[in-house]
Image (cartoon, helix red, strand yellow):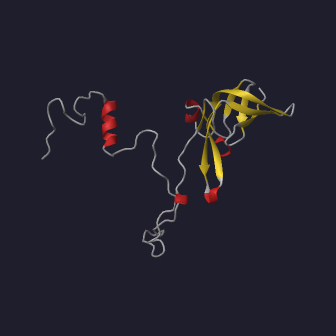
Amino acid sequence: MFTAPSGPNRGYLPTGSSSVGQRGLEIRGAGRPHPKGMQMAHWHGISRRKPTGGRLKRPNRYRGKRRTEIAAEKQFTTIGEPNRKVYRKRSGSQTVRALHDNVVNVADTKSGKVTQSGLTNVMENPADPNYVRRNIVTKGAIVETDMGKVRITSRPGSHGALSGVLLDE
């Protein structure tokens, strides 16, 4: 039979800590949940089971996971000081991701010119409404710039640059 501990060290709170934040750090330190921002790896490999649920025989039994089958971590482009990250892809090629950026290349369809404009805020994002609150920029997002509203046409996580088209108001 289990009895709850009594006294100042009752429950999950460690000795001498009275806040839930410190408790969370110690629980994570014990190897339980992942801290905020850290995610488990996503594996895009071959399943080791049949559609019926039975196990597959060779070569799946002895074939391990490959580095190329592990997906890259999710890193979204936000508004801030320009920061880019270079990733290695298959066969040694590289891709650049924009982690933060505060400048967007704006194409004006009326004049046919492209100019750089300062990025201030995310107005709408059809990918996810929560991205507006977090100021995450994706393709199709409508952002507020110095020139006006701009719809992003590039993929900042894949292309490493922010490009967009000026919207008519």
Q: Quadrant of residue 22?
A: top left
Residue drawn at (33%, 36%) of the image? 24
In this picture, is 10 found above or below 31?
Answer: above
Q: Say whether residue 4 is left or right of residue 157.
A: left
Q: Quadrant of residue 9?
A: top left
Please, which residue is most extreme toward the front here?
92
Q: Say whether residue 37 is left or right of residue 118.
A: left
- Compare residues 70 and 87 and report the one nearer the observer: 87
Residue drawn at (13%, 41%) of the image? 3
Q: Position of residue 104 (x, y in %)?
A: 71, 32
In this picture, is 150 found above or below 43?
Answer: above
Please, which residue is most extreme toward the right here?
111
Quarter of the picture containing the C terminus is top right
Q: Position of residue 84 (x, y in %)?
A: 62, 39
Residue drawn at (24%, 37%) of the image? 12
Q: Say whether residue 68 is left or right of residue 103.
A: left
- Compare residues 43 and 89 and report the one nearer the observer: 89
Q: Position of residue 47 (x, y in %)?
A: 49, 65
Q: Is residue 108 visible?
A: yes
Q: Is residue 157 visible?
A: no
Q: Position of residue 78 (x, y in %)?
A: 59, 34
Please, which residue is most extreme toward the top here?
146
